[in-house]
Amino acid sequence: MQVQSRREPMPAVGSTTTAARTPRGQLRLAGLRHPFRWGAAAPVIDTIALARQLAGPLGIGSIESLAPRTTSAHQLSLDAIGPHRIAAWVGSALAITGGLVPVPTLYLVRGGWLEWEGQDRRERLQPGGVLYLNSPSYRLRSGVCSVVAIAFDPLRLEAQIHKLAAAGLGEEACRKVLAQSVLGGQSGESWGPLVQAISSLLDLFERLVLTDPRLVPRLELDRLLERLVVTLLLAAAGGLEALDMAGAGALPPPRDAIFEALLVRIRAHLAQPINLATLEGWSQRSRRDLQVVFRDRLGCTPMQWVRRERLRRARLRLEQPAPSDTVASIASACGYLSASRFSADFRREFRCTPSQLLQAHHTARTPLRTEK
């Protein structure tokens, strides 16, 4: 049975960070502001429970206490802003490793410190710093800290990149931007205002969910957050001047309504057999024209794009499976006639098997046993 802590005012963010767990099971943190709506009344959970609840939304592989001889206690809030999952927690020192599949995630440090190790780099973030990761190969360490983490829908971020970036930016270039690791808010960086804007937007979201949650979708805070994060990624990839040059380097190609409608139709019929003859009929274009326009707009062939969309759809299903879902049923629902072919394509694209991902998320959803 989880112990509910009493509602008490929490001190503002500061540099002093101490933690202790009282006999009543109440987590007390000095100098850290608790995240989001639950405040001091959030239930206290241990490291194992924290790992299970964060594995799904953040794609985390494991969480370990850095002080195993002492009692670890954490308060966790889970929320969503549009399709993006938000996890915010206050707790003791941790070591976090990435999972099987990369999930684009932005970490914002509100108190304490968070250290990132990956790509032969090691950086420490102080309060106000952000870290963007989209790789399964990383390790995070923290002291007693308060952290907000946002796991983004990768398709929504990619759509925003196409809107904000230079004309003709191919799909491969978009993937490279989304796959980079970015630290923001550190001293001397030119995109500090972007980090401040992201932090302010999260503060606004926190206030709205406490006062009038209906304003969150009305103000389209999820879209605004996507634009800010994508702008940060583009600025980190090419400098802020790259954003000014994005629209000035070349005039964008004329909007092709037929091509846009074709993409929408493909996504709506991914479960059905699709070949070049099908695409010719839907678009009233020749195969050669389709090859050229897909290569120019998306950097791949038509059937390569169809395969990628099927695999992305399948990954989303595997990350949020229904109790009855199997690898074979998801493969069929995403247009694969052969489960073995689906598994081979999926492993080539995401560097893990569908069964591994499905098992990981089924395990993460297993209810925790509580002591009576």
Image (cartoon, helix red, strand yellow):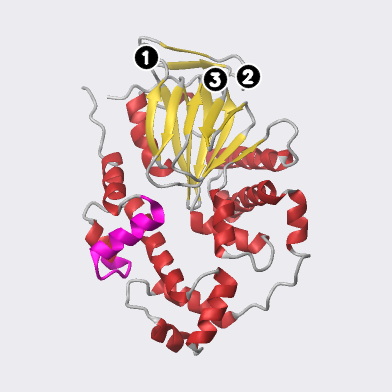
Magenta segment includes 341: yes
- Report which residue position mark 2 lands on: 14
| Most foreground residue, 102 or 91 | 102
For the residue carrying disc 3, how many other residues have a C-alpha within 10 Å: few (<14), some (14-19), or many (20+)?
few
Between discs 2 and 3, the one toward the N terminus: 3
**Type of the residue with mark 2:** Gly
Q: Which residue is mark 3?
A: 9
Question: For the residue labelled by badge 3, is the local secondary structure a helix, a strand or a loop?
Answer: loop
| Closer to viewer: mark 2 or mark 3 | 2
Q: Residue at x 61, y 80 (%)?
A: 256
Residue 35 visible to the viewer: no
- Determine crowd level at label 1: few under 14, some 14-19, many 20+ residues with C-alpha closer than 10 A: few
Q: Earlier in the sequence, mark 1 or mark 2?
A: 2
Seen as rendered, the residue at the extreme top is 23
User: Can you give x and y, in whole percent of width and height, for residue 283 in the image?
Assistant: 49, 86
Q: Residue at x 66, y 49 (%)?
A: 237
**Residue at position x 62%, y 22% from top?**
13
Q: Which quadrant: the C terminus?
A: top left
Residue 23 against residue 217 in the figure, above or below: above
Disc 1 from disc 3: Cα separation: 23 Å
Kind of element beneath mark 1: loop
| Residue nearest the observer in this picture, 253 or 155 | 253
Task: Identify whether 63 is placed above or below 288.
Answer: above
Residue 325 lies in quadrant = bottom left
Residue 29 can be seen in this image: yes
Q: Quadrant of residue 327?
A: bottom left
- The residue pinned by badge 1 equals 71
Label 2 crowd bin: few (<14), some (14–19), many (20+), radius 10 Å = some
Q: Which residues are magenta?
A: 332-351
Amino acid of disc 3: Pro
